[in-house]
């Protein structure tokens, strides 16, 4: 049974709850591949996607997940809402709640926004990415993909490479994989490694070649192009040379290592096109699994997960 009303992050969720979500997602994935992808589970429920930042994968997969479970879905982007007229986040979500929404799925540039919302409204809140804090459903779909491919998570060496400092995906992956018994390493330029990150239990590397040794899973992170202006690395070419995953570097990991990326990718910068499209890449499967995992999360939070 899932104990919480909201999904804000993986830091405060325990291993049996993660296991339950992943197991439920296995059943949901079967629905995703049916010719008619509709079950009545969330009929009569209303789910609102409230996005203050751009998104392709997360917003669309939450919408598909809700529709496959027969919920009604409302999509709101800040640029097309009364937010542009100055309406506050609190008034916006209270307005949505007054119209009877059961779940608010929020993406927001500010870390902590989802948690704030959860204190303001009675509806369930799901964090779809808040600043550099967490992106819990991305962490869950990453774990689901690895478990599906490798059979189990315990003991695997997971290496996360790139801009760890600004990555909410990295944080959710670190909490999630460690709770499930995997070994997690992070690697990136020293300017992009948060102080004290080793206190999470992750190992820290500045050399990608060392980090990749014996890796079972490699998670490449998007380099946020605006970081170059902030002086966190000298040039994109330099970054690609020192931290990009290419065919030669991939050979340092285990032969059957999985290559993952949450998207969107900068091909030729953090990952070569050849590696992104290689047989070891499960990047497209991550996207498919995102729908199944989000169906599981919606179901467990409001659809009868207590049963
Ligand atoms: N992985 C991810 O969050 O992608 P989007 O920004 O497209 O949702």
Image: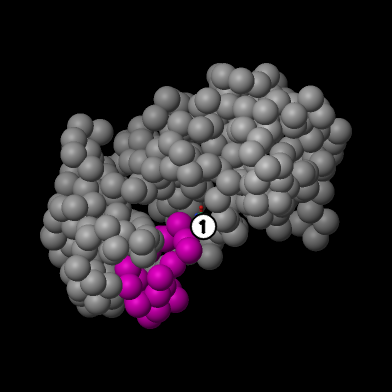
Q: Can residue 220 be seen by looking at this rendering?
A: no
Residue 278 magenta-highlighted: yes
Up the image or down, 26 lies above or below 113; here it is: below
**Image: 299 above or below 120:** below
Name the residue located 62 percent from the left edge and 27 percent from the top edge: 90
User: In terms of depth relative to the viewer, which is nearer, 33 or 58?
Assistant: 58
Q: Is residue 266 above or below residue 97?
A: below
Of residue 241 and residue 231, the one placed in the foreground of this image is 231
Q: Residue at x 15, y 65 (%)?
A: 209
The residue positioned 59% from the left and 39% from the top of the image is 106
Q: Is residue 208 magenta?
A: no
The furthest residue to the bottom: 274
Helix, strand, or loop for circle 1? helix
Residue topped by disc 1? 286
Secondary structure of the magenta portion, mostly?
A: loop
Q: Position of residue 290 (x, y in %)?
A: 57, 51
**Which residue is farthest front?**
85
Instruction: Work out which quarter of the rendered image holds the C terminus and state it.
Output: top right
How far across and down, in percent of the image, does residue 262 sit?
45, 57
Q: Quadrant of the N terminus?
A: top right
Q: Is residue 179 visible?
A: yes
**Left or right side of 42 for 195:** left
230 over 109 or under it: above or below: below
Q: Which residues are magenta?
A: 255-279
Occupied quadrant, residue 271: bottom left
Please state the horizontal and vertical placement of residue 81, each as a whole percent of the image: 71, 45
Depth check: give the residue in front, 155 or 49. Answer: 49
């Amino acid at each position: 049974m899932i104990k919480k009303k909201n999904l804000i992050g993986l830091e405060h969720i325990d291993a049996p709850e993660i296991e339950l979500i992943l197991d439920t997602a296995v059943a949901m994935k079967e629905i995703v591949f049916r010719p008619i992808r509709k079950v009545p589970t969330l009929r009569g429920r209303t789910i609102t996607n409230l996005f203050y930042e751009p998104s392709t994968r997360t917003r669309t997969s939450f919408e598909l997940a809700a529709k496959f479970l027969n919920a009604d879905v409302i999509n709101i982007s800040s640029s097309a809402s009364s937010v542009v007229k100055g309406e506050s986040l609190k008034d916006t979500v209270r307005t949505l709640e007054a119209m009877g929404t059961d779940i608010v799925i929020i993406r927001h540039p500010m870390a902590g926004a989802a948690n704030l919302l959860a204190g303001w409204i009675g509806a369930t809140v799901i964090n779809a990415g808040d600043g550099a804090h967490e992106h819990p459903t991305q962490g869950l779909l990453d774990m689901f993909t690895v478990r599906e491919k490798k059979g189990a998570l315990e003991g695997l060496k997971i290496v996360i490479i790139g801009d760890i400092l600004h990555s909410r995906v990295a944080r959710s992956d670190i909490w999630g994989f460690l709770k499930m018994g995997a070994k997690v390493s992070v690697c990136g330029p020293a300017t992009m490694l948060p102080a004290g990150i080793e206190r999470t239990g992750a190992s820290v590397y500045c050399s990608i070649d060392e980090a990749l040794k014996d890796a079972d899973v490699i998670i490449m992170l998007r380099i946020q192009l605006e970081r170059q202006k902030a002086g966190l690395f000298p040039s994109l070419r330099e970054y690609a040379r020192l931290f990009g995953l290419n065919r030669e570097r991939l050979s340092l990991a285990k032969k059957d290592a999985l290559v993952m990326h949450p998207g969107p990718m900068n091909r030729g910068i953090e990952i070569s096109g050849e590696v992104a499209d290689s047989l070891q890449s499960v990047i497209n499967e991550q996207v498919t699994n995102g729908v199944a995992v989000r169906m599981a999360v919606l179901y467990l939070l409001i659809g009868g997960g207590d049963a």
